[in-house]
Amino acid sequence: MSKSETRQQELHSKNAAACPVVKALETVGTQWRLQVLYALTESEMRFNELKRATGGRSKTLSDALEVLVDEDLIERRTEEAAPIAVYYQLSAKGETLVERLEDVSQWAVEWMDDVEDPDTVRPRFG
């Protein structure tokens, strides 16, 4: 076992209560993944609609979608009619996550000095 693996196990055992939060943030905690989740709160969207809604580049969006689909946070649906269309929507798991993100959003507005209330800027999560 490498020194790095031993260190990771030590940190895990000392911080077992924080580990689920760390894992969750590693999974969804990038700007682009959060932007995709937020965009999908309104409705199902196609790739280019998500691209416009998030302002992301194709590769960035593809990478975010891949992780979110793999984690079952969003669902990917393909319509085979010509032209082939791919749609994305929040899964039940993703909808539950977005509800929790609303709590984080409210906490940030209340406790962080440099965070604006999203109600004054754009519609909130959910």
Image (cartoon, rainbow, N blue to C red):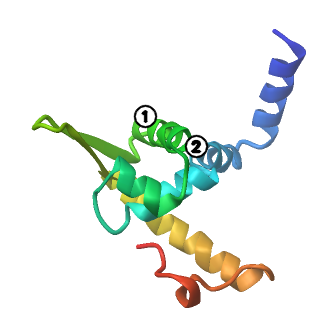
Specify the farthest residue to the bottom.
120
Q: Residue 46 location in percent, x, y?
A: 31, 51
Mark 1: which amino acid? Answer: Asp
Whole-percent x, y for residue 21 in the image: 64, 50
Q: Nearer the viewer, residue 17 or 3?
A: 3
Can you identify the residue that label 1 sits on? 70
- SS assignment at label 2: helix
Instruction: Name which residue lies at 46% across and 73% down.
Output: 125
- Between the C-alphas of marks 2 and 1, the distance is 10 Å
| Amino acid carrying mark 2 in the image | Thr
Residue under numbered circle 2: 27
Q: Residue furthest right?
A: 3
Residue at image position (57%, 85%) is 121
For the N terminus, give its image quadrant. Answer: top right
Q: Relative to 2, is 107 on the left or the right?
A: left
Relative vertical location of residue 20 with respect to residue 125 in this rendering, above or below = above
Structural crowding at the residue carrying mark 2, measured as other residues with C-alpha within 10 Å and reported as few (<14), some (14–19) or many (≥20): some
SS at circle 1: helix
The image quarter containing residue 120 is bottom right
> Along the horizontal axis of the image, is 5 left or right of 39?
right
* Image quadrant where residue 96 sits: bottom left
- Residue at figure coordinates x 13%, y 34% from the top left: 80
Query: Quarter of the image containing the C terminus?
Result: bottom left
Most extreme residue toward the front is 83
Mark 2 or mark 1: which comes first in sequence? 2
